[in-house]
Image (spheres, grey):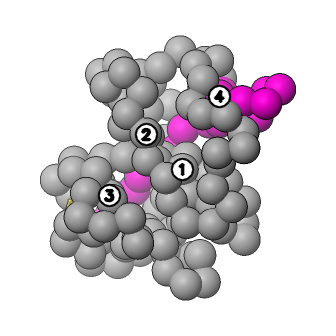
Amino acid sequence: MEMNHTAWTTFPNAPAPGTVICPAADVPQTGVKSFDLNGFPLILVASGDGLRAYVNACPHQFLPLDWRSENILSADGGVLRCSNHDAGFDACTGAGVDGHGQGCALDPVPVVVSGDQLKIGAP
Ligand code: FES
């Protein structure tokens, strides 16, 4: 499924490029970490493929992926599994791969390390 790389900008309270997410030292090396950026839900996903960021709203019912558990990344880092109703997403691309995730996708958010901070990137 085709990713929509600007969909995140249409969410309420979408942060401006350059908005600080967290200190670079706080970026997870593996697993997930979610943030509320002034009302904009963001989730970082760290695996062997590197760091990804998505709007933390599962397309099934728009609940945060880690609402019920933070343990949502598969052991091999390949699949994100929504803690609510088990929708599966490719951790690297956000594409839905299983269950309620089929036919939909997470919305990727660009992030950049700048100095000693992780920030929102340009759309
Ligand atoms: S809200 Fe994610 S599977 Fe239902």
Residue behind mark 1: 44
At mark 1, the secondary structure is strand
Give 96 or 2, whichever is nearer the viewer: 96
Q: Position of residue 111 (x, y in %)?
A: 65, 36
Crowd tier of the residue under label 3, counting other residues whose Cα lies within 10 Å: few below 14, some 14–19, many 20 or above: many
Residue range in magenta is: 100-121
Distance in Å between CA atoms under marks 3 and 4: 21 Å
**What amino acid does circle 3 point to?**
Leu
At mark 4, the secondary structure is strand
Distance in Å between CA atoms under marks 2 and 3: 12 Å
Q: Is mark 3 within 8 Å of ligand 1?
A: yes
Residue behind mark 3: 65
Crowd tier of the residue under label 4, counting other residues whose Cα lies within 10 Å: few below 14, some 14–19, many 20 or above: many
**What amino acid does circle 4 point to?**
Lys
Q: Is residue 60 left or right of residue 35?
A: left
Residue behind mark 4: 119
The residue furthest bottom is 75
- Within the displayed image, which quadrant is ligand 1 positioned in? bottom left
Q: Name the residue at 35% across, 78% down.
A: 98
